[in-house]
Image: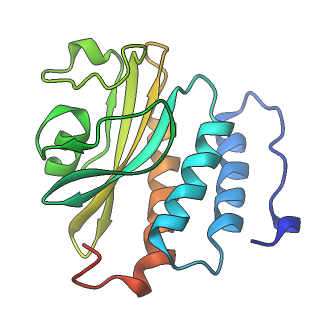
């Protein structure tokens, strides 16, 4: 990473402006790096340390079931079945899911009892799911469609940067 490209995020109440800077920093972190794990590790750290009211941020990779990857926060569930909980449902349905109150989500898996809301973004490659980005918050209703739109762009950037190294052993 070129340190000159990574910039301090400005204080702003404008969510679009904020995410513009987050995406610039994400691109600086993954620029020239093709390793999926390395890219996910840096993005998990970036998001955990820049998003407000977040208590967990990380990735799960699909290997018949979702298996814990790089993350920031308290220790987490290691394996999640596809179709189970928010993460497994997002992987099964291949769509971003925003949950305002995790206690109201059928089959929610409580890895951290402090989490109140959640957003899960699938990592898609060749019409299949590689894994998911999962972000939890101790605040009800923390995530919205703007978060979803920009987090989907960030996840797409990770997949694109890493796609040259994908093969049958990776997935």
Residue 40 position, x and y percent, is 50, 59
| Residue 138 drawn at (x, y percent) | 48, 16
Apparent side of residue 166 relative to residue 81 in the rendered image (left or right)? right
108 relative to 3, above or below: above
Left/right of residue 23 with respect to residue 166 in the rendered view: right
Furthest toward the right, the residue is 4
Question: Which one is nearer the viewer's eye here, 50 or 13?
Answer: 50
Please state, as top left, top right, bottom left or bottom right, where the C terminus lies in the image. bottom left
Seen from the viewer's position, the closer of residues 11 and 69 is: 69
Kindly indicate the quadrant of the structure image that contains residue 80.
top left
Asked where in the image residue 33 lies, by quadrant, the reply is: bottom right
Q: Is residue 139 above or below residue 131?
A: above
Q: Which residue is drawn at 57% across and 54% down?
A: 43
* Residue pictured at 39% horizontal, 21% vertical: 117
Give the image's coloring scheme.
Answer: rainbow
In the image, is residue 52 above or below residue 122? above
Classify 94 as above or below 84: below
**Left or right: 168, with 145 as reference point:** left
- Residue 155 position, x and y percent, is 46, 58
């Amino acid at each position: 990473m070129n340190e000159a490209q990574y910039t301090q995020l400005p204080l702003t109440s404008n969510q679009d402006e904020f995410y513009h800077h987050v995406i610039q920093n994400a691109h600086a972190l993954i620029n020239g790096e093709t390793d999926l794990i390395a890219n996910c590790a840096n993005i998990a750290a970036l998001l955990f340390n820049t998003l407000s009211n977040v208590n967990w941020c990380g990735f799960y990779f699909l290997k018949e079931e979702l298996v814990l990857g790089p993350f920031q926060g308290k220790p987490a569930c290691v394996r999640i079945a596809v179709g189970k909980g928010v993460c497994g449902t997002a992987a099964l349905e291949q769509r971003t899911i925003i949950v305002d109150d995790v206690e109201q989500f059928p089959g929610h898996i409580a890895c951290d009892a402090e989490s109140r809301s959640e957003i899960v973004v699938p990592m898609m490659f060749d019409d299949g799911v590689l894994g998911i980005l999962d972000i939890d918050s101790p605040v009800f209703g923390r995530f919205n469609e703007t978060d979803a739109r920009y987090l989907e762009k960030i996840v797409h950037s990770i997949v694109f940067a890493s796609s040259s190294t994908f093969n049958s052993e990776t997935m």
